[in-house]
Amino acid sequence: MNTLRQLPNSAPVLVLCIVLGCVAGAFAEPLGEAAYAIGQVYVSLVTMAAVPLLVVAMFFGLRQLLALPRPGLRIGTMLLLAIALVAAGGFAGTAVGFATAPGLHLSAAAHAQLGRLILASGGNAGEVRMTLFAQAGSGATDGAFALTDVVPDNFYGALASGRALGILTCTILFGMAFAALSSEQTKVLNGIFESIYRTLEALIDYANLLLPVLVFGTAAHLVAHTPRETLSAMSGFISVFLASAAALSCVALAAIALRTRVSFVRTIGCLRAPMLVALTSGTATAAIPHTIEAMSAKLGCSRGVAELVVPFGAVFVRAGSALYFALLASFVANLYGHFLDLGDCAMIGAAATVAAFASAGRNGIGGIAAAGIALSLLRLPVEAALVAFVAIDLICDGPRNLLSLLSTCTVVALVSAGVQTDRATATVATQPATRYGDSAIVRLAFTRGQLAVVAGCALVAASLIVVMGIGVGAR
């Protein structure tokens, strides 16, 4: 069983699954579709467990963070860093898009293929709408943003519909009230939450055994259902995005290594499991338990900070999405011959940052509506963004989640400054090595008088045992 648990954390195994999935998508499509269906079951299981895990982890994180020195400063720092990193992703994407100009020098065949995709969409991709209050009893349509998504009037309704923003808001408010109570008042509830926490961690751990199947099925589905002409037309955008995401991920890893005083290679090794899960699972919440464990037990950051920031970052710190939206806006602008000046670049960077926060809690096709925020400011058609997103989403989703995860880990490392390390080996390293590891050695010392008393008592006890034995034998 331990060997099976190591498979989702093995990069060679996952690479092999990608290769085999591509072969299956080309020559054995039914097998690939079956694996893809099983992979969707995995995503459903992880999402089911991740939402309550997000709630419980933030309860513990808020309680522990409020017990640390200067909690208000740490919470403020966390929020400012989250905004700054998302903005950095948006403006970095804008700078890269301005320098590389993806979509500017497409061939005639690529233009024709994208034109056919846009025409096939019917031109009715929809508009980005923002309503302050959704009508009661009517679900929000795809792309619509309502204030009740952020501040729900029914917490159980937000849980039932999986609205991550509303769940996060209610969790923060309830967690602050929970943290304000005394330990005696919350003793029973703490035990219940602890049991729920460990159960959900175990559930996600077991569900991750299906991760290689998901990778195999996703690769097969991509090869079988994505036209090669579309991949060729979007190859410039894909290569620029992947290179930018990889470069920014390395910067984030270097910042984590510098703050935790661990080598760069060691940092990669500690974060290998959550990085692989984020890169291949297709969901931002699947790596929450692995990330908390890696940042606290392996890299020595405060567990209280990690338990608060990691669930928060899985929803809000979407630096990868900001990078993606900025490059997407640059691509569509170049595709339609719209020359970008410095004013347009500043507008794209700011709009990509806003779009990243607006897409919080939305994955897959539902998040594309946020890209329309940047495109609408440039007066570019949203349907082009929809087509590009649908065509390459399976390729770009993993690097996007990975960059967001590492940005969250950077926030954890920086907010944990000045807090006593939680690294599992920290206390062991400061103690002299003994033959019995961490076990305490008990030494008994007796005086001669004490030894004489002990010997006399032992002699009396032995004599009584002999006498009792003789008595029993005589009867």
Image (cartoon, rainbow, N blue to C red):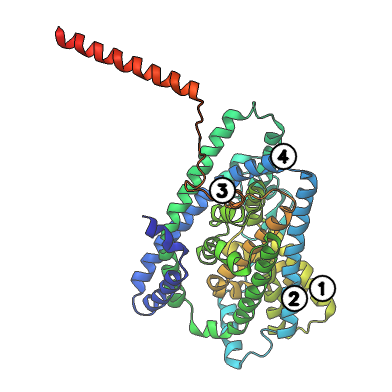
Residue 152 in sight: no
Return the residue found at the far bottom. 108
Per the model, the C-alpha gap separating discs 3 and 4 is 25 Å
Question: Which quadrant does the N terminus fall into?
Answer: bottom left
Query: Upstream in the sequence, badge 3 or badge 4?
Result: 3
Q: For residue 94, which numbered disc appears in the image? A: 2
Marks 1 and 4 close (CB-CB < 8 Å):
no
For this rendering, which residue is in front, 292 or 340? 292
Q: Which residue is denoted by mark 4 in the rendering?
A: 67
- Helix, strand, or loop for circle 4? loop
Return the residue found at the far right. 343
Looking at the image, residue 2 lies above or below residue 465 = below
Per the model, the C-alpha gap separating discs 2 and 1 is 8 Å
Splitting the image into 4 quarters, where does residue 402 fall?
bottom right
Q: For residue 51, which numbered disc appears in the image? A: 3
Query: Upstream in the sequence, badge 3 or badge 2?
Result: 3
Marks 3 and 1 close (CB-CB < 8 Å):
no
Q: In percent of the image, x 62 and y 74: which residue is there?
A: 246
For residue 259, side relative to residue 13 (left or right): right
Q: In percent of the image, x 56 and y 79: which residue is there?
A: 117
Per the model, the C-alpha gap separating discs 4 and 2 is 40 Å
Query: Upstream in the sequence, badge 3 or badge 1?
Result: 3
Q: For residue 346, which numbered disc appears in the image? A: 1
Identify residue type, mark 1: Ala
The 10 Å Cα crowd at callout 4, few under 14, some 14 to 19, many 20 or more, is few
